[in-house]
Image: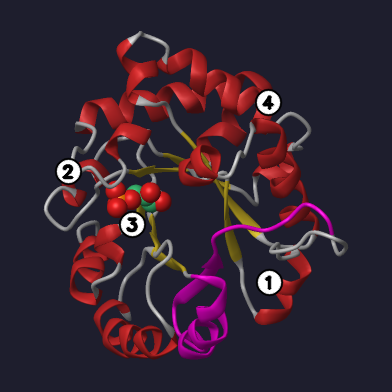
Amino acid sequence: MKNKIIAGNWKMNKNRAETESFFAELLPLVADTRNTVILCVPFTDLCKAVKSAQGTNIHIGAQNCHWKESGAFTGEIAPSMLVETGVEYVIVGHSERRTYFGETDATVLARTKAALNAGLKPIVCIGETLQERQSGKTEEVLKRQVTEGFADISAEELGRTVVAYEPVWAIGTGVTATDEQANDAIKYVRSVFAEKYGKAVADKLFILYGGSMNDGNAANLLAMSDVDGGLIGGASLVPQKFAAIVHSHR
Ligand code: 13P
């Protein structure tokens, strides 16, 4: 059985001092886990987070990166800049970036490719909106996001990539997908990957669930056959809650 990946996404929360105290509290709480623990923090907290996590079992990620290595892209960060900072992972294509900052499957693919080329491990987010689910389009949307968002990603590159299924209607709403909804969607996503890359590659791929996961519902979600872990927003801001999620799968 695969261990799980438990990844926190702080979004636009916490300053440097708060980052330092968060890690001081979290480290002893998760030191003995077999699961992979990742924290994706704001750019300005990365140095503190990397330093705090040095020599521990915690991995650090950013929340976005650009597709070019340098140039006139005001406000963007190049993958190599993240690597230089000691970052290992980067979230790409989060629904908040798709909704508020115009990310498309094409820009998600470009950022994913650039992250991989720089040696980062991308955590690529996909997921349907409430309207898409209610009109029966969930599978159609997921298929498009996988087909177009991974168009020229090789099997070797997919092996260095994590996927997060985050139904938009479950993010920050307190409405979690049921265990079955999460598992069915992830199983479907895995089947789409299997069509292109073969079953062995698709089975190895880590596909996480994200959307109002917390210390109360994590154990059941993580017990589902296809749910390889969680991408956690709100509950990743509190060390005790996040640690409880990490330990909800042993
Ligand atoms: P919440 O856990 O706050 O719903 O956020 C989920 C998410 O968007 C993680 O990327």
Q: Could you tell me how far apart the alpha carbons at marks 1 and 4 are, in whole angstroms?
A: 25 Å
Q: Secondary structure at mark 1?
A: helix
Q: How is the image coloured?
A: secondary structure
Kind of residue at badge 1: Leu
Q: Which numbered disc, 1 or 3, marks the residue that appears first in the sequence? A: 1
From this view, report whether residue 63 is shown above or below residue 243: above
Residue 110 on image: x %, y %: 75, 43
Q: Secondary structure at mark 4?
A: helix
Question: Mark 2–mark 4 contact, CB under 8 Å?
Answer: no
Kind of residue at badge 4: Glu
User: Viewed as shown, does residue 69 lie left or right of 214?
Assistant: right
Q: Could you tell me how far apart the alpha carbons at marks 3 and 4 are, in whole angstroms?
A: 26 Å
Kind of residue at badge 2: Asn
Reading the image, the residue beneath label 3 is 233
- Mark 3 close to ligand 1, CB under 8 Å: yes
In front: label 2 or label 4: 4
* Mark 1 surroundings within 10 Å by alpha-carbon count, few (fewer than 14), some (14 through 19), many (20 or more): many
Q: Residue at x 72, y 33 (%)?
A: 106
Q: Could you tell me how far apart the alpha carbons at marks 1 and 2 are, in whole angstroms?
A: 34 Å
Q: Which residues are magenta?
A: 42-68
Q: Which numbered disc, 2 or 4, marks the residue that appears first in the sequence? A: 4
Residue toward you, 237 or 59: 237
Residue 220 disc label:
2
Q: Which numbered disc, 3 or 2, marks the residue that appears first in the sequence? A: 2
From this view, report whether residue 204 is shown above or below residue 160: above
